[in-house]
Amino acid sequence: MADPNIAILLQHRAVLFGLLAALMLGALIMPAWRVLALALGLVSTSSFVLIALWVGSYNTEIGRVVAVDVVVSVVLAAGLLAAMVSGRSGA
């Protein structure tokens, strides 16, 4: 990568994804973390989609990420809703 500024931003984003992944893995065994993990995952994926749509003029590769993030956002939203409903029912 020619631009060190882009490398810094991308590596920092990778660290944040790693932290989010660790939280989500922890939520597999710690049910109390599930709503937080799903909510943060939803914020992460949906914010990327919204930013990409707002900025526009993105390339095909970013378009693929947007499409995947739309699907992942729907799945995370469904999981979040299920976790919140099951938490209210005492399950």
Image (cartoon, rainbow, N blue to C red):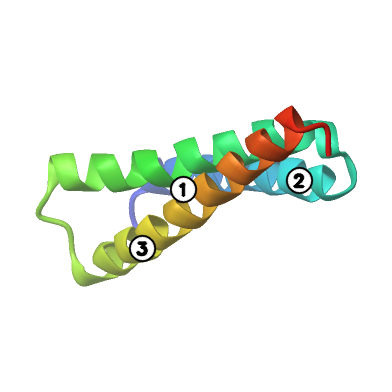
Give coordinates of residue 63: x percent, y percent.
Answer: 25, 65
Whether residue 49 is situated above or below residue 64 in the rendered picture? above
In the rendered structure, the answer to whether residue 15 lies left or right of residue 45 reads right
Packing grade of label 2 (10 A; few <14, some 14-19, many >=20) is: few
Residue located 15% across and 39% down the image: 54
Report if residue 41 is visible in the image.
yes
Q: Where on the picture, by quarter, is residue 39?
A: top right
Give coordinates of residue 31: x percent, y percent.
Answer: 84, 39
Please name whichever residue, 71 or 4, is drawn nearer the observer in this view of the structure. Answer: 71
Q: Where on the picture, by quarter, is residue 58?
A: bottom left
| Badge 3 vs badge 1, beta-carbon distance below 8 Å | no
| Residue to which mark 1 is pinned | 10
| Residue to which mark 3 is pinned | 65
Q: Secondary structure at mark 3?
A: helix
Task: Locate the N terminus and report the quarter of the image it occupies.
Answer: bottom left
| Residue to which mark 2 is pinned | 22
Whether residue 74 is situated above or below residue 23 in the rendered picture? below
